[in-house]
Image (cartoon, rainbow, N blue to C red):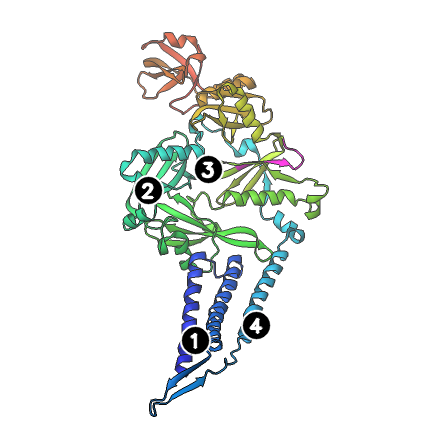
Amino acid sequence: MKKRSFTSIAGRIAVSAVLIFLLFYTTLPAINLKDRNFFQFLIMSILIILVVNFLTFVKDFLSRLFGGGFAHRDPVTGQVIFEKRQEPQSVSLARPLKIGFAAIAVLIAWMGIATVWGLPLFNAARYRDLITLTDGDFAADIAEIDMHNIPVVDRDSASRLGDRKLGEMTELVSQFEIADNYTQINYKGAPYRVTPLVYADPIKWLFNRSSGLPAYITVDMVTQQTDLVWLEEGMKYSPSEYFFRNIDRYLRFRYPTKIFDDVSFEIDDNGIPYWVAPTVTYRVGWWDGKDIDGAVLVNAVTGESTYYKKEDVPQWIDQLYASDLIITQLDDNGKYQNGYWNSIFGQRNVRRTTYGYNYLALNDDVYLYTGMSSVTADQSNIGFVLVNLRTKDTKFYTVPGATEQSAMASAEGQVQHLNYKATFPLLLNISNRPTYFISLKDGAGLVKMYAFVDVEQYQIVGTGQTVDEAKENYRRALNLEDVELEEAAGAEPVSGVIGAIEPVVVSGNTCFYFTLSGSDTIYSAQITLSPELAFLQPGDSVSFLPAESGNPVSVLEWRQ
């Protein structure tokens, strides 16, 4: 009897352990009392233990209760003997059941207390201080960007370009698809979007898992150049993997106590692919006020991983903070400027982010840009913020003006006969004026035109089929031609004899490319700058001031 009882207990323990492991394997909670998911895991584990034991008890109880009597033959005398089955023994599980349900009640009660503890009603100042805004000088902080370095590709366009590139690779398209990450990074001084391949389905994974994912996609946001970057050795760790090579499961079993935010895909300066897993901390109450205190970097090929504190994260990491987290913190900062009740009644100095954001590449970092508006104003901004997505340094610029949606509508209005749709604006510095730059796309999602819209006066718009043409029309609308000439006046005059000159039609505009004798520098000038360009020949003498000194291919202000 004792052996049977021991076997029964061991079996129940084994079944419970297996079910609890499978629960952990699929839900992947952090073994951390700050993780809500861990409390839910504990509750489910207790229920598993109770159910396994309760079902065993019910089976035993029913077999005893409905067994009735039975007859058997005595092996010695051969006489048939009828015996009545014993009544069910008093098997009581009251105590373990009470303990189990009491434990569940305690866990649920603590979850309720912890939730109330973190309510904004009691912590408005802490929510406000999750992010700190300092005043910035727009002209000093944001240099005027070279027109040939403006990113014109948004996430949707990058996705289309990536799909087209993969479609060219017939040997891959049947086995792999493209992930929708398209993380924006700075790579070798230029803005890029990068994303890995994923297995097309479980069968494709089964046949390709030994070699891993063979490549990733890069999209140059300026030139729209899209490349499929092949790896010497495939990526063995990714979200599309199964079992213990799945990146989320791999991280959980290597760092069981860490609470992770969503992983993102990036490449380092050498093009090596990594998964960046930010680690979460909570700064309000028990598990509220989500923030980032570090990151685990996982080599997507080898699986080598390293944890870094936030201040030690490598410079090449561009997006440690998720954009949605930053937007939430900015909204809380604006909402609770004067306490919780003021956010509901009165709403003095209460502000919010506008409905959207974009990214700006500055000083080898990626910054999140979004406008800030008063909660009572829907058509104007009181300013905008730039947030470094690696360090969370945040600057606020007081520039009253149009919201991004108003600027988008204004740009679309300039080409309403073409039915182009505007992308979310990018904030630029044009002659020390905050200016929205917008790409205009057709129904197929292809970029067809560009627009510059003044932030303070959104009815001032310049559009064009090239970035240079749009900027020129914008400056004309602002009457800034004289300003540009003053800027050019500071450059060294260029004189010489034309060595070669060729007219080229670019998006319907005639542009002359030429060189000077004894120099390899290529200059460019649109016909609108001087009608005499059409009559220049090799051997003619010219003198001019470059509008953008040091740029070998630049728009010129012509001086005769």
* Viewer-nearest of discs 1 and 3: 1
* Viewer-nearest of discs 2 and 4: 4
Residue drawn at 67 percent across, 51 percent down:
121
Disc 1 to disc 2, C-alpha distance: 48 Å
Residue under pointer 4: 98
- 18 within the magenta span: no
Q: Earlier in the sequence, mark 4 or mark 3?
A: 4
Q: Earlier in the sequence, mark 1 or mark 3?
A: 1
Residue under pointer 1: 9
Q: Earlier in the sequence, mark 1 or mark 4?
A: 1
Q: Earlier in the sequence, mark 2 or mark 3?
A: 2
Residue under pointer 2: 176
Packing grade of label 3 (10 A; few <14, some 14-19, many >=20) is: few
Disc 1 to disc 4, C-alpha distance: 19 Å
- 370 within the magenta span: yes
All told, the count of numbered labels is: 4
Q: Decide whether the magenta segment is chiefly helix, strand or loop.
A: strand
